[in-house]
Amino acid sequence: MTTRQELPAPAPIVAPHSADFWAATAQERFVVGHCPACDQWFWPPTRSFCPRCGGPARLREPSGKGTVYSYTIVRASGAIALGGGPYQDAVPYVLAYVELAEGPTVLTNIVGVEPEDVTISLAVRVVFARTGGPEDPALPRFQPV
């Protein structure tokens, strides 16, 4: 059994095409892309058009619930894997694809559980890690329901 540590929450670089997404996270609202014309939900949420029909897209809040589709436990030191930085002492942590109830798959972290207890199909819900950066955007992560 490993000892669970808090993951760092570095402030993201907010580009013009992602500003609305990060503004929503600052309010602890999780949004994904959605096409009202064909009801397609998608990730990443920064597209201005639907990947299915090409229609105009907008941001919409999903339920925030999903299941672990795939995951890995990162055990290599951040100093080796990422050249240092905020994740240098964060190992072990879980990097996972979460399939949202609405369909899209999101690359994220699983928190609030020992890495060894994460399983495929684990039911999870979105939580937010405050970054303290400009406008204080939050990183969406997922924890078991």
Image (cartoon, grey):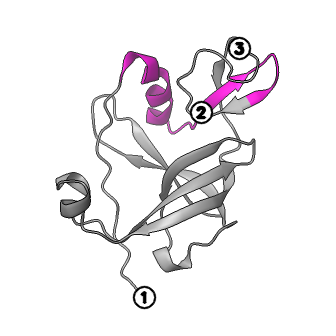
- Give the residue type at disc 3: Gly
**Residue with the most extreme top position:** 56
16 part of magenta stretch: yes
- Give the residue type at disc 2: Val
Q: Which numbered dot is residue 31?
A: 2
Which residue is depicted at the point 48% across and 63% down?
111
Q: Is residue 141 left or right of residue 134?
A: right
Q: Which of the 4 image quarters holds residue 139?
A: top left
Measure the C-alpha gap from mark 3 to mark 2: 19 Å
| Pointer 2 with pointer 1, Cβ within 8 A | no
- Tell me where residue 31 appears, x and y as whole percent: 59, 33
- Give the residue type at disc 1: Met
- Mark 2 or 1, closer to the camera: 1
Which residue is depicted at the point 63% across and 45% down?
105
- Tell me where residue 16 appears, x and y as whole percent: 39, 16
Which residue is depicted at the point 57% across and 54% down?
97
Which type of secondary structure does the marked residue at label 2 adopt?
A: loop
**Residue with the most extreme bottom position:** 1
Give the magenta range.
Answer: 15-40
List the residue tagged with mark 1. Answer: 1
Label 2 crowd (10 A; few <14 / some 14-19 / many >=20): many
Q: How many marks?
A: 3
- Mark 3 or 2, closer to the camera: 3
Which residue is depicted at the point 49% across and 51% down?
108
Sequence-earlier tag: 2 or 1: 1
Sequence-earlier tag: 3 or 2: 2
Decide which of 135, 3 is in the foreground and name it.
Answer: 3
List the residue tagged with mark 3. Answer: 54
Q: Which of the 4 image quarters holds residue 133?
A: top left
